[in-house]
Image: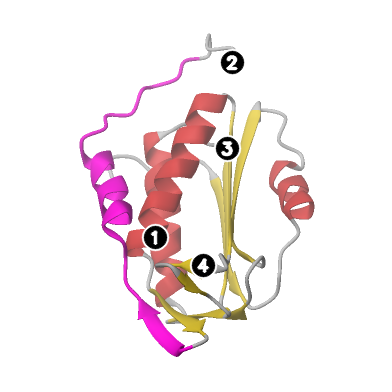
Amino acid sequence: MDKLPQARIAISVQTEDFDLGHEADVLSAGDRGIGAMVSFVGLVRDLNLAEDVVALELEHYPGMTEKALLGIAEEAAVRWPLNAVRIVHRVGRLHPGERIVLVLTASPHRHAAYEANTFIMDFLKTRAPFWKKEWTPDGPRWVEARDSDLSAAARWHQVVSKQYGNTDHD
């Protein structure tokens, strides 16, 4: 990375559910420079590859996973002017409709917050060491990265981020 990110970054990998409102309040507390906050919440689907999903089991490598998530957040904070980033990823056995992941990005301006949030999710799906096992009525199966996830991450190698100046009032 060319420069060190200035954003406050917080990463959690946990079995417990999270509260979006609480996480957003904590992220923005005391930071009057935040003009936009973007949130992404991923949920367990009840259908994948035309099969019913009864549960999703997520495993991770403690220490390595948090380090990978931190690296992704730091890369986003170098590309865009972010005040703060919060990533919460759940592990363990989850059921359809339950929350899996939260990504919050905060910036003075909306474009940076949106782009950084999308960037983080695209790389989280392809770089972070999580292993997913879906449970269907016929039994378990391991879930591989989708081609669409790999393509989404690859597009960022061609994207040159726009710099946002103090005159941008969106």
Return the residue at label 1. Answer: 125
Foreground disc of the pair 3, 2: 2
Earlier sequence position, callout 1 versus callout 4: 4
| Badge 3 amino acid | Asn
Residue found at the far bottom of this picture = 139
Please state the extent of the stretch shown in magenta in the rendering. 138-165
| Badge 1 amino acid | Lys
Relative to residue 121, is residue 56 drawn left or right?
right
Q: Quadrant of residue 50?
A: bottom left
Residues 131 and 86: in front is: 131
Q: Is residue 119 above or below residue 23?
A: above
The residue carrying pointer 4 sits among few (fewer than 14), some (14 to 19) or many (20 or more) residues within 10 Å by Cα, namely: few
| Badge 4 amino acid | Leu
| Badge 2 amino acid | Asp
Report if residue 140 is visible in the image: yes
As helix, strand or loop, the secondary structure at mark 4 comes to strand
Return the residue at label 2. Answer: 170
Query: Residues under labels 1 and 4: Cα distance?
Result: 18 Å
Foreground disc of the pair 2, 4: 4
Return the residue at label 4. Answer: 47
Return the residue at label 3. Answer: 83
User: Residue 19's spot in the image, x, y percent?
Assistant: 76, 59
Report if residue 71 is visible in the image: no
